[in-house]
Amino acid sequence: MAQLIADRRDVDFVLHEQLEVETLGRHEKFAEFNKKTVDMIVSEARNLALKEMLPTLTAGDEEGCTFENGEVKVPEAFHRVYDLFKEGEWIAMCDNPEWGGQGMPATVSLAVKNFFHGANFPFTLHVLLAHGAGKLVEKFGTDKQKELFLKKMYTGEWGGTMLLTEAEAGSDVGALTTSAVKNEDGTYSITGNKIFISSGEHNFTENIIHPVLARIEGAPAGTAGISLFLVPKIWVNDDGSLGEANDIVCTGIEHKMGIHGSPTCSMTLGGRGKCRGTLLGLENKGMRAMFVMMNEARLDVGMQALGCASASYMNALNYARVRIQGRSPDAAGKDAPGVPIIQHPDVRRMLLHMKAYTEGMRSLLYYTGLCEDKMRISDDADEKARYQGRIDVLIPIAKGYVTDRSFEVCSLGIQIFGGYGYTREYPQEQLLRDCKITHIYEGTNGIQAMDLLGRKLGLNKGQAFTDLLGEMKKQIETAKKIKGLEDLAADAEKLADKLAETAMHMAKTARSEKMMTAFAHAYSFMDITGDAVMAWMLLWRACAAAQNLEKGAKKKDISFYDGQLKSARFFIKSVLPLSMGKAETILESDDTVMQMSEDAFGGK
């Protein structure tokens, strides 16, 4: 059967043969998640994605969301899917069953999300936001707040979102103007306006719980004075019953390039002076709370992009196998029959490019989840710190690099269809449109590059980045001992060494009078770090495939394993030389970007 969203064989390969996720079951926390259970979960998710979610993708895009008199309606077809999500308990997959979660490993949940995002990313956004808001309540809420809100959010009875962005502040969150004044009963009166709020209003649930960033009257300027509040759409009484409507109103929805099934709302709080909220966490510690949740949010964005890329690749591959067009370049005579376009060298080049990136990105994202799982089951403080450091360094790659490459994959997916790919007859153009937003939210990709250079490179006095390089080197040493992979290991090692050299140069430059020049090269540094991580992941895959072939693979698996070897070879031989060139450019520290006067850009 043709794959439509993600290659199930490849998902299983990453889970069981590369990452060996079932070994997590040796710990009591994940004891019930053996291979059989993991496979069953993935199968159920895949069935839901294919049979229920995918058929609503085009309808959701064409119908979109509507706004009238402060009310937002989502595409009608989404309501059945939302009910199925609630019934299947898919919203809080990794969370405590006490609060409505399933308690599964993060690695497995990412495989599930791979199918959900590939089938219908705009719909899946709704439930992810509810979970993210719930996680803030779980991490920072009082016992009373958890009692009132958490289970209803994790089970999907109530929705959730995050009110962060303001028109004037944008990514400079510290410049926000939303204010909070403490009332005599301990609640706060909230006043302000927020924009770009995904699922800020919808008709899935009767209540929506909004974590809101605001500044308490008299608090310090900048991020140091920001607090986090819980502001429900409908006030929740102490006994859990619903009270009066709160003064938080949607004033409009954006008309966007993509994700039409997900409403992006403008919200006004306290327009009538009656918006109430309760403090979530400590005063003036709102940004600290948000940063705790940032890794999960940015990893989810990477998964959203991968879902689009994975689906685009599957569509392109299926199309290339059946689309007859042109003779083979090596065909003899002008009367030679037409061939499927997958036989044309340039189409094969594009498909292999899509395949290598999609597979490498899948491994990277699942691996980041595995680090989270291992951190959760470890009793060793130093080991937990190492895993956390590794996650912290990988997150800018998982968000910034992965979304960039996923957009490229979606663009190639259109190219393989030719003119048909540019039309709405096929899903390729929607996947590209939907994917674009992943470059922008949860911190634009330029911010991810700045984060990698400014915070993650020097994390734990540079030990976290050094540890990541060490993990790459371990895999390279393994590959050196496997026949047929020696040259790939050597090339990957050259880039790893060059990355270490470049990282030291960037760290030194960022601490010098040429700091701005360093940040002008931050994006290229994120790119070569991402390329090195991709090479590591693909080489790891190749090692597992070669070892399985050596043991005597089943006939049905031989082509799959050969495909792993070819993906690694294509990427390492075709992409890494370009990465080496980017590294040399960084080492030259050309500062044209900063020397350019504003007038020299033209336009006057």
Image: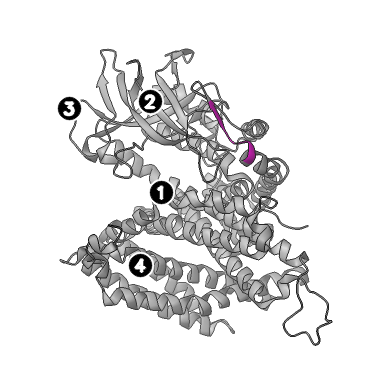
Do the CB atoms of the residues marked 3 and 2 lie less than 8 Å apart? no
Give the vertical position of 41 relative to 553 (above or below): above
Disc 4 residue crowd, few under 14, some 14–19, many 20+, Cα 10 Å: many
Q: Nearer the viewer, mark 4 or mark 2?
A: 2
Q: Residue at the spot x=49%, y=53% of the render?
A: 302
Disc 1 residue crowd, few under 14, some 14–19, many 20+, Cα 10 Å: some
The residue type indicated by label 2 comes to Thr
* Residue found at the far front of this picture: 604
| Element at label 4 | helix
Residue 69 in percent (x, y) is at: 50, 20
Specify which label sits upstream in the sequence, 2 or 1: 2
Residue topped by disc 2: 268
Quick one: 563 or 400, which is closer to the camera? Answer: 400
Q: Which residues are magenta?
A: 62-67
| Element at label 3 | loop
Disc 3 residue crowd, few under 14, some 14–19, many 20+, Cα 10 Å: few
Q: Residue at the spot x=78%, y=69% of the render?
A: 324
Quick one: 146 or 510, which is closer to the camera? Answer: 510
The residue type indicated by label 1 comes to Asn
Give the vertical position of 473 relative to 372 (above or below): below
Give the vertical position of 224 relative to 527 (above or below): above
Residue topped by disc 4: 525
Residue topped by disc 1: 295
Q: Is residue 541 left or right of residue 314?
A: left
